[in-house]
Image (tube, grey):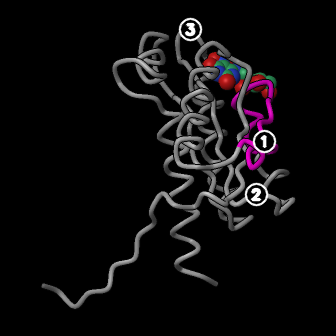
């Protein structure tokens, strides 16, 4: 055995409060991500009263609203959900890059977990695969990550 102390989060943060910010663009995909995220939170004992969902126009708008929500200090974590699909969109890189950079910036500047449940894929088929079909559900994954990060930060303290 080793003497190294290891600290990791678990999924027991049932009293935590969560803000979910979800984009309406590609809504039929994002709705599945949202269902997945809510399912995970509920199955882990989080009460519906501890969850708020805010809808934004597109993935590019996720960071600003995530920042507003984080700044209220009402939540223990923010879960961002969206779907950026390259398809024929010339500005995919700007939307996906701005979204990812912005959300990372919110987490650091607000000192709050921001789970990245945003699909960045080439095709609608790939998005469907990652939204509750054969490649899992990125919304569920993000909710699990949020639960784990809340628990981890509680353990780390400070
Ligand atoms: N927004 C998305 O969430 N997904 C996309 O695939 C997408 N594409 O392809 O353009 C998209 N564009 C809109 C963007 O997020 C902003 O809402 C828009 O540019 C206004 O700021």
* Residue plotted at (39% across, 28% down): 136
Give the mark toward the camera: 1 or 3: 1
- Image position, residue 157 (x, y; %): 60, 82
Say few, some or many: other residues with alpha carbon within 10 Å of mark 1 (under 14 / 14 to 19 / 20 or more): some
Quarter-of-image position of residue 139: top right
Work out which quarter of the rendered image holds the C terminus and state it: bottom right
Task: Give the magenta range.
Answer: 48-65
Q: Is mark 2 within 8 Å of ligand 1?
A: no
Q: Is mark 3 within 8 Å of ligand 1?
A: no
Give the mark toward the camera: 2 or 3: 2
Q: CA distance from mark 2 to mark 1?
A: 9 Å
Q: Secondary structure at mark 1?
A: strand
The disc at residue 6 is none
Q: Which residue is mark 3?
A: 88
| Contact check, label 2 and label 1, Cβ < 8 Å | yes
Quarter-of-image position of residue 62: top right
Which of the two labelled residues, at mark 2 and mark 3, occupies the earlier sequence position?
A: 2
Say few, some or many: other residues with alpha carbon within 10 Å of mark 3 (under 14 / 14 to 19 / 20 or more): few
* Residue plotted at (53% across, 41% down): 43
The disc at residue 75 is 2
Q: Is residue 3 left or right of residue 132?
A: left
Q: Secondary structure at mark 2?
A: loop
**Ligand 1 position by quadrant:** top right
């Amino acid at each position: 055995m080793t003497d190294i102390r290891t600290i990791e989060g678990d999924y027991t943060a049932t009293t935590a409060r969560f803000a979910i910010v979800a984009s309406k663009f590609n809504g039929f995909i994002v709705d599945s991500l949202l269902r997945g995220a809510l399912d995970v939170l509920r199955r882990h004992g989080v009460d519906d009263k501890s969850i708020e969902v805010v809808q934004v126009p597109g993935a590019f708008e996720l960071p600003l609203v995530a920042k507003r929500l984080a700044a209220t200090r009402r939540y223990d974590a923010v879960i961002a959900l969206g779907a950026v699909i390259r398809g024929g969109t010339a500005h995919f890189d700007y939307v996906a890059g701005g979204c990812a950079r912005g959300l990372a910036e919110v987490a650091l500047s607000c000192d709050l977990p921001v789970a990245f449940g945003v699909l960045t894929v080439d095709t609608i088929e790939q998005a469907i695969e990652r939204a509750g079909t054969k490649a899992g559900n990125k919304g569920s994954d993000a909710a699990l990550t949020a639960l784990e990060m809340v628990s981890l930060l509680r353990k780390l303290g400070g």
